Amino acid sequence: MDMTPKQIVTYLDDYIIGQNDAKKTIALALRNRYRRMQVEPELQEEIMPKNILMIGSTGIGKTEIARRLAKMMKLPFVKVEASKYTEVGFVGRDVESMIRDLVYESINIVTADYEEKIKDKIEDEVHRQIIEKLVPPLPEAASENAKESFIKTYNVMEKKLLDGSLDDKKIEIEVPKKAHVEILDSSMPLDMSSMQESLNKMLGGLNKDKIKKEVTIRDAKVLLRSDASENLLDREAIKVEALKRAENGGIIFLDEIDKIASGKTNQNQDPSKEGVQRDLLPIVEGSSVQTKFGQIKTDHILFIAAGAFHVSKPSDLLPELQGRFPLRVELESLDEDALYKILTNTKNSLLRQYKALLKVEEVELTFDDEAIHSLANYSVLANQKTEDIGARRLHTVIEKVLEDISYDADERKGEKIIITKELVSEKLDEIVENEDLSRYIL
């Protein structure tokens, strides 16, 4: 987490074009979390995260900014739709489920970290178990000659196991018989979750026996690894660390928040919308939520809300909820230049992805610079004539241009295909000009 705001923005520039205000705001919010952890504990409790409200139409990078950051910093991150809590039968019934999702995510991240730390121990344990099947241990009363012969055989087998030459050989291994009930439903009531936990413990106590399986050594490595990691990992330490990470580093991205805004002037007021906002308030303000891994305080979780706000406006949210999102960022719509840069300057751009996909069929695909400008231009026109869906329009436009080439790729092995401005125009002119066709095809 020890990255300066400038380093964070530089990292984001590889994946997201423009939106510098949003990048700076989020970079500062994350840096402040690091700064908070360095101050004295007494003051740490007082420093609250500055939650962010991002305003802008779809496809301009709101979700991508938050997702990329969480991935880079290995922070627990969940994305939830605010509108999900207005569904029939849900109606904001359990907004706490987003916190439980965050804890699950944190458990997965910490488990992966711990497994990485003891990777060598896990590998050694797996190899030991496999070699024992190949070269059974000698009885204690064995002669010195037998012991020497055993050590030589053991070393030869170990070498063969490590270089993979035994991978296709079959052996019989014992794996735990799992009688396990696992329902990963974060919206499940807590008493049901506790009941599930008790049932698992009871079934685990009843079924300590193992079942025998005949598998190849390649498969045995995978099957035995999960059992070895289960025995070597300290589950209690993982639980404690995961709760700590979720509390102090967790990020919840609350999308479509404009869908639960209900203004005073709105004639078709949905009472459930205000109910969802009221349910969200204690979570965002800071409260304690009980999860199957223990209690978690939400005071220092960073909430990033986002919405297009076409119909409603941020002031239509409850004043108390507005106050909990002090940082506001308005994201700009994407023009032709921005779309061109998205196609050429981003790290894993769409053009690079399509080139890689067709390379599988041994077709070399290249794009003229004029053709790329043309793709960006047609995307902007389609966004203007129909709904503005931002950079997502590029997917549709490129797919339409490459449809026939992709379909016939197996017959064009070894060919080099150049996408020109003329080809782009031929495929898209009629569709973009005809507004009705654009609505249905692009």
Image (cartoon, rainbow, N blue to C red):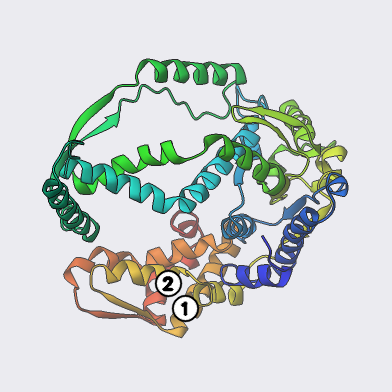
Mark 2 highlights which residue?
351
**Coordinates of residue 37 in the picture (x, y in percent):** 77, 53
In the foreground, 47 or 333: 47
In the foreground, 117 or 23: 117
Q: Is residue 224 above or below residue 403?
A: above
Q: CA distance from mark 1 to mark 2?
A: 9 Å
Residue 191 location, quadrant: top right
- The residue shown at (34%, 21%) is 208
Q: Residues within 10 Å of mark 2 (few under 14, many from 20)?
A: some
Q: Is residue 269 visible?
A: no
**Coordinates of residue 105 in the picture (x, y in percent):** 56, 42
Mark 2 residue element: helix
Q: Which mark is residue 250?
A: none
Label count reads 2
**What amino acid type is highlighted by mark number 1?**
Ile
The reply to whether the C-beta atoms of the residues labelled 1 and 2 are less than 8 Å apart is yes
Q: Is residue 78 above or below residue 338?
A: above
Of the numbered discs 1 and 2, the one sitting upstream in the chain is 2
**What amino acid type is highlighted by mark number 2?**
Leu
**Coordinates of residue 27 in the picture (x, y in percent):** 72, 63
Mark 1 highlights which residue?
372
